[in-house]
Amino acid sequence: METAVRSTLTLTGIGKEYPGTTALSGVDLTVRPGEVTALLGENGAGKSTLSSIIAGVIQPTVGNMEWQGQTYAPSAPGDAIEAGISLIHQELRLLPDLSVEENILVGRWPTKRGLIDYPAMRSLAEAQLSRLGFKGRMDQSVGSLSVAGQQQVEIAKALMIDASVLILDEPTAALGQAETDALFECIRSLKAQGHSFIYVSHRLSEIAQIADRIVVLRDGRKIAEHDSGSISEEQLVREMVGRPVERLFPEIPKSTGSELLVVDGLSDKLGRFTDVSFSVRAGEVLGIAGIVGAGRTELVRSVAGLEPRASGRVTVAGTEIKPNRPADALKGGIVLIPEDRKQQGVDISETIENNIALPNLARVRKAGFITPRRVRKLAEEVAAKFTMKGNVASPVGSLSGGNQQKVVIGKWLETDPDVILLDEPTRGIDVGARASIYEIIDTLARAGKAVVVVSSDLDEVLGLAHRVLVLAKGRNQGILPADEATPQRVMSLAVQ
């Protein structure tokens, strides 16, 4: 009993004020040993602020914390880490040019006779990553990994310090089902050893699987607390957004259009996918499913001219798109909404209006010159169309994840493409913003566009798509119509 008390983290009346903004107000939270506490809420609800306070990234304006029976007031992340509390950020913080093993033990590299002991380092790294189902090499650079692989490395780093409390911020946002299952097994194993978790996620379907308790935040306040993870998604959504969301996935009418995008025998120069063929009709949504490493992202990037292809043809409305030339794909009517919006989709240090103007320069020129008035007008039109929050003169980095994603989608849709490829379109965004993205996809399909959705969230693929293409080890294992695309059928093809 004494150990349990010492291992409990308690927050009382935590508040955080910024000039003109209340980020948190009077939040109480107890994190018990051997439990997973799910922290839910829309973007802007205060989840990240609360997590950052616990991890010593920022300090509260008011309130107190206790850890292991003592006052706990970390002034920096190092204080929290030393105390045994680790935050695994959603935005990965790795050194891309270093190897996997070097990243996992960075700052703690084992030595032998004054030199780095690489065999020992590899053994330690492998021991952690094997628990997460990692499939890569220990000596490859982290920058060469997929987002999912990098996320696994980030989690393994935290496990290396043997933290008593791990704060996981959207840990499965880039993971497939197999990797998610491996992570959950690891969490359960660590729970049995007395480790505690604060689990932040927008994937409500995961909560019942992993959470022991649920705390819901809205507008910086604690709205509800449940002593069970088995709470209906409908109730959680209502608590998170303050209103019911009647239907998360829109009913997109079946396409009757002709083939708009045709991909024939596409193969990657690096062997990540081979001989993939599919077509998408005008007004149709094609979902692409598969476990991490199946080649989904590489496939759509190749269609968009961003990855080198060895063979195959891509045509839009009968016109062939030249290989390996993104400008030709864009000119031919293909746009890609990438999986990593902050690295590939927007310049977060630039303003909303400048980001929107960049691919639409012809719209904002007058007599050969870009005019600020036209830039502002275009941005305000796009912001209104996609219900973006925030002043268009503000930097994109000041927006929530959902609004950042709307900037990425909005700037490319203003080019009026025929084919829209969306790679992980709702990664790391809340249920309210997710519903808005789904409505955009519905609007695109109804306007006669060909839409391709790649997602690690199988519910998302099945909820949106008219047909589902299943990739496994870079090969097309079959294309299922919506009425045959059950989770069991999709996963049986995905693991072939």
Image: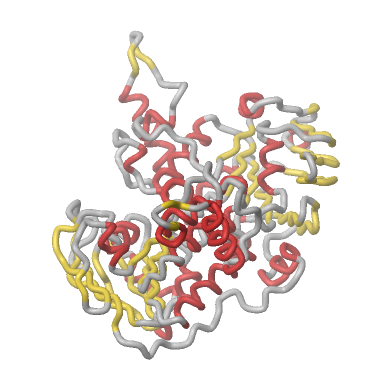
- Residue 379 versus residue 493 in the image, above or below: above
Q: What residue is drawn where x is 35% and y is 30%?
A: 98
Q: Quadrant of the C terminus?
A: bottom left
Between 201 and 36, the one nearer to me in the picture: 201
Between 199 and 265, the one nearer to me in the picture: 265
Q: Is residue 178 visible?
A: no
Indicate the quadrant where residue 273 lies: bottom left
Residue 215, horizontal then vertical, whole percent: 74, 54
- Residue 223 versus residue 89 in the image, above or below: below
Q: What residue is drawn where x is 46% and y is 22%?
A: 107
Q: Is residue 484 visible?
A: yes
- Say whether residue 315 is left or right of residue 479: left
Looking at the image, how many numbered discs can be counted on the residues? 0
Residue 395, horizontal then vertical, whole percent: 58, 46
Residue 217, horizontal then vertical, whole percent: 75, 54
Q: What residue is drawn where x is 80% and y is 53%?
A: 222
